[in-house]
Image (cartoon, rainbow, N blue to C red):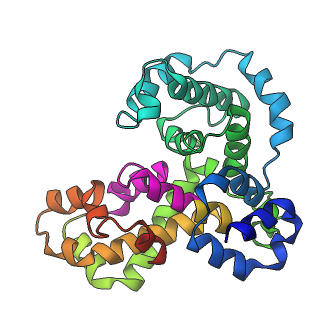
Amino acid sequence: DEEFWKSIVADSESLHKIPALLTAKVRAGIPPQLRVKIWAVLSGTEVERWKEEYPKLLEHGSPFEKIIRRDVPRTFPKVDLFREENGRGQAMLYNLLCAYSIYDPEVGYCQGLSFLVGPLIMQNMTEPEAFAVLVRLMEDPDPDNPTALTTNTTKRIYGLRSLFTPQMTGLHELLYLHEHFLSRLFPPLHRHFQSHRISPSLYASQWFLTLFAYAFPFPLVFRIMDVLIAEGGFPTLLRFSLAVLQRNTGRLMEEEEMEGILGRLRGEALWEAYGGDTEAVVRD
């Protein structure tokens, strides 16, 4: 499998010729030591461009500097890389968030972006590499070429920025689709939620805005990002959100109070249903 991924790095133009094989290989797992290069290749990231342009962004002051500096130390308090005050991890996270707020003033800064940037840093990416992937993941589709979402694997459009714009149109779309498929696929669970006045906005907003990093361990978040980068942003987030509910249906149905249901949906109890098996989430 490692030889397969090395061949992909060497010949990224072949990606569009093997979509089914690529999907199978991604779901089987990307070698951690190759993840930086594979994420860049699969996303069509322009690393060389940002090696030159990223430092220029840092020359400008961000209007969000104070709030970013306040948020950075408390974003990943349990992760060693980010634990040291003003250490390398915190400095990289601060720089990347400031740079993006300058690059995309409409989005500016919101705390959820840290959960997208953090996993990039954890792959031992340089700041320009992480910023290059971030820009690709946030990029909106071209309204004049909507088929770009599906016809060009190496230049897939992820559109995650619509989760973080002031209108949060992407988040509203995902929440609508999540409830639609929840009612169609798992009607008893949907009725259980309705009877306790639980809407997706009360639990799934947190999932989507943090790429599940708030409730799941980072090795699983990395696997979610593997699939997201290979198969698309919204479809992947939607599929994982439904798979998690399916796996936890029995336990959720046993809860008879709103607080108990939300406590399970918002916390680490979701992960307990998998018995520590990261790959089970991907298989689901």
Residue 36 pos. (x, y %): 68, 49
Residue name at image x 73 percent, y 34 percent = 128
Task: Give, as a single range, the part of the protein colored magenta.
Answer: 198-225
Q: Quadrant of residue 119?
A: top right
Q: Quadrant of residue 212?
A: bottom left
Q: Quadrant of the N terminus?
A: bottom right
Residue name at image x 50 percent, y 16 percent = 66
Q: Determine if the magenta segment contains residue 278.
A: no
Q: Determine if the magenta segment contains residue 220.
A: yes
Above/below status of 123 relative to 246: above
Mark count:
0
**Left or right: residue 9 compared with residue 133:** right
Residue 251 pos. (x, y %): 19, 73
Give the farthest residue toward the front.
3
**Left or right: residue 221 compared with residue 5:** left
**Left or right: residue 268 compared with residue 67:** left
Q: Inspect this view and state whether residue 154 appears.
A: yes
In the foreground, 193 or 26: 26
**Left or right: residue 230 compared with residue 86:** right
Residue name at image x 85 percent, y 60 percent = 10
Q: Inspect this view and state whether residue 178 appears.
A: no
Residue 14 pos. (x, y %): 86, 71
Above/below status of 271 relative to 217: below
In the foreground, 147 or 172: 147
For the stretch drawn in magenta, the main secondary structure is helix
Residue 138 pos. (x, y %): 67, 48
Q: Quadrant of the C terminus?
A: bottom left
Q: Quadrant of residue 262?
A: bottom left
Residue name at image x 56 percent, y 25 percent = 94
Above/below status of 139 relative to 56: below
In the foreground, 124 or 70: 124
